[in-house]
Amino acid sequence: MTRNITTNHRRRDDLNDYWFEKIAVESKTAEEIRAHTVPENLTPVAKTLALLDSQSDIQRLAGIRSVPSIVISYPVEGSQQILPKFKAIIEQTVDSEEHVVGAEAIVLMIQQQALSYSDFMSCFSQMICGFLFPTTTNRFSTDFGGIWCQALCNTIDAFPSSTLFTSLLDLIFNRILHGSYVRDRLAIILAKLSYRLPSQAVENRLLPVFKNFINDTNADIRALACEKLPILAQSLESDKVSTLILPLLVILSKDENLTVRQTCLESLLILHNELNEPKWNEQVREMITSLVKFGLSSRTSTFLTSIAVHLPEICHAFTIFNVNEASFIQEMFLRLTQEKNIPACRLACAKHFTSVVDYLDHEQFTRELEDTFLRFCKDNDVNICSTMPSTIITLAKLYCNKNEKNDVSIIWNGFLMLLENTNHDVMFAIARHLLDIFKIFSRDKSEGFINGTICSTSAVPDPEIFVNSLLEYERRIFEMTLSWRSYILCLQAFVHLPCLLSSELIQTKILPRIFSRIFTRQVCVREVAVDSYVQSLRKIPRRSVRKNAFQKLKTDLLLNKSYQWRLMYIKVCRQILVHYSKRFFKENFLETVLSIGFDPVLNVRIQFIPLLIEIKSILRLPADRQSISRIETMMECFLASKTITLHDLANNGLLQLDQIRSYKPISVFSAHSSDDENDQNKENEEELLDELDSSSRRSSNKSNEQYAITKRLTDTTISNKPNPPVKSPRLSKPSSDEQHRRLSVTKQRRRQSLVDSTASRIPHQTTIKKNIKCMKTILKQKDE
């Protein structure tokens, strides 16, 4: 029985039925291939000439790009053969890319001093002016004037500052007289030449041209001329700026075109320092005020945005003119902040909020400005909220110096609003400025120890609310984003929190969160979390808290079964060496750290060798003779290892150990004097921390005793219990509290000794026994 089987497969001859178009393949003839082939045995000059004569656009571009290097390497052949061919190609080509590459080549030759000013004028100046100011016949066919206008500006900047461009100026003026020209390009070129011309030439030759531009019928030309007037003013003498430039700005300030008036306002704000003369102050102020009012009434986005962007210049102009325009500035600023349909205007207002407040010089925020500031902090526009952290920093600097607590509280509330924002860009912006914000709001040096790090009270209002908001922000940026760089900045800022919060909040809220981040998967986060945790612990004035925290690090990291966490404990020890004194490390970590040398994992021992060198650098003879001997013995045992990596590291480590001087420096000019001074400061701070801890305990005991005495004195109730008999002090036994305290201290000491004795007990006893046997053998050889 036969079946009809339907298949979707096509035969090879059915490819023409497919929907896609066939790729057109053009085969080259032998003559065409030969015409596009450049022989390899040509000299660099001949090869460049061959590329320039090629009919291929790619090869011709390659030849144009190689012109500067050939002219620099072969100046004679380059000037006689390459440059004429290069100029002819640029004059004849209609490809805009070749014009761009050719302009870059000319600028590069001038920068490399391969083309002098005279050579440029004789070879390329006529060509460039022809492209800039074409005649009427070919003006509208193909125009490359924009490319060469920028190229000529770059060329003028590339020549040395001592070059005078009088001949170029003459050429430009002669070119203008013989044909129609483009006025906008002429304005740009003349403004660029004004830097390199004498003041008299600018006054006599350039200003008349710009006066003509100001009376032009085209508003764009008038605006461009107004934009270039401040550039011309920099080349004039200071006493002539007001007499020559200001009358032109007066004419432009009354122009009927909005763009011209906007440009006039910007030029006035640029020149307000040069126009600061008593007889012109009133006129300039009135011009600025009238232009701002005109811009506000125009309700155009560009004009309003320009006013908002130039708010600092407007305030500064009124300041140097000694004019009190506080009401006008405040009204103008509030008017700009209400433009909800112009985000760029409101963004500029948010950036320059501090400039306006500084000019108003209010003793405290007015109601309108306070509402505006808080509205910016919770704005729906992400860009505005992202720029507010930097605004908060500058605003806090302004009011923290004036000790305005009410205003500082308002700024702090705005910062709390920003912490509640869940947008990623806003959270990243806060992370970049978080450390600076903490530093601004931290307490003074007089309020605590070590720049205000030790205090029983917080330096910020509502510390509980702040800590909850901060921890929630830290959780969001850790869990909701993948920007570990931003989260690392957040963790690094946490180190400065003891300057803001009390030790109780640091101990109960901040330290547990940082400790939890030590065990994350991201290695970069672990290392920064370790650093932040160690530094934050140093600022806790309770010895028991620090001791328990370091003991927990030993238990969770050093005694962990995973070697990765034992590696992390090595990093903890390095941070201890950096941030704590030598005595603290030797008393609390030295014995435990040396047990890492018996670790069965090779990677742990490899990472342990650099730590041994750092430990040796803090040890001193004769007090630490035994520890130094143990370190050298351990390094020699590593040297006997069969692993090449461990052997090489131990070999280099022994050389570095020999170079470390372990005796105390005698001279005060020793290289160790600065390090010893820094270590002494750390030790003094740690001692002061212990004293603060003991004094706080004594004060708490005194307060408890005073409370008990006061309660007995004020207690008027009659007790029914008989009074206990009075006992002699000699026959009195220790109280139960005293006995309990002694027992707890004894148990704690036994527990500590037990932990220290078991700290070095790790698995793989065979490897440990081999290491111990190796060390004993080396010690025995030393004794013999």
Image: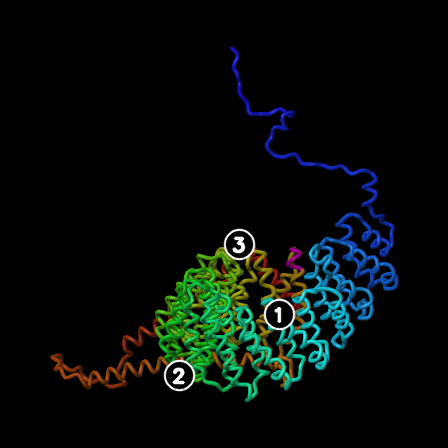
Secondary structure character of the magenta stretch overall: helix
Q: Residue beneath label 3, please?
A: 764
Among the 4 quarters of the image, the one containing residue 75? bottom right
Q: Residue beneath label 2, please?
A: 363
SS class, disc 2:
loop
**How far, Cα to Cα, is label 2 from label 1?**
50 Å
> In this orientation, which residue lies closer to the viewer: 538 or 779?
538
- Three-letter amino acid code of the residue under disc 2: Glu
**Contact, CB < 8 Å: mark 2 with mark 1?**
no
- Position of 402 relative to 100 (above/below): below
Q: Residue beneath label 1, please?
A: 216
- Three-letter amino acid code of the residue under disc 3: His
Callout 2: 10 Å neighbours few (<14), some, many (20+)? Answer: few
Please tell me whether mark 2 or mark 3 is closer to you in this view.
2
- Three-letter amino acid code of the residue under disc 1: Asp
> What colour scheme governs how the chains and residues are painted in the rendered image of this protein?
rainbow
x then y, percent, for residue 111: 76, 68
Answer whether residue 748 is visible to the viewer in this image: no
**Contact, CB < 8 Å: mark 1 with mark 3?**
no
Q: Residue at x 24, y 82 (%)?
A: 708
SS class, disc 1:
loop
In-image side of 47 versus 367 (left or right): right
Q: Residue at x 38, y 78 (%)?
A: 365
Q: Earlier in the sequence, mark 2 or mark 1?
A: 1
- Position of 243 relative to 383 (above/below): below
Callout 1: 10 Å neighbours few (<14), some, many (20+)? Answer: some
Give, as a single range, the part of the protein colored magenta: 643-647
**How far, Cα to Cα, is label 2 from label 3?**
72 Å
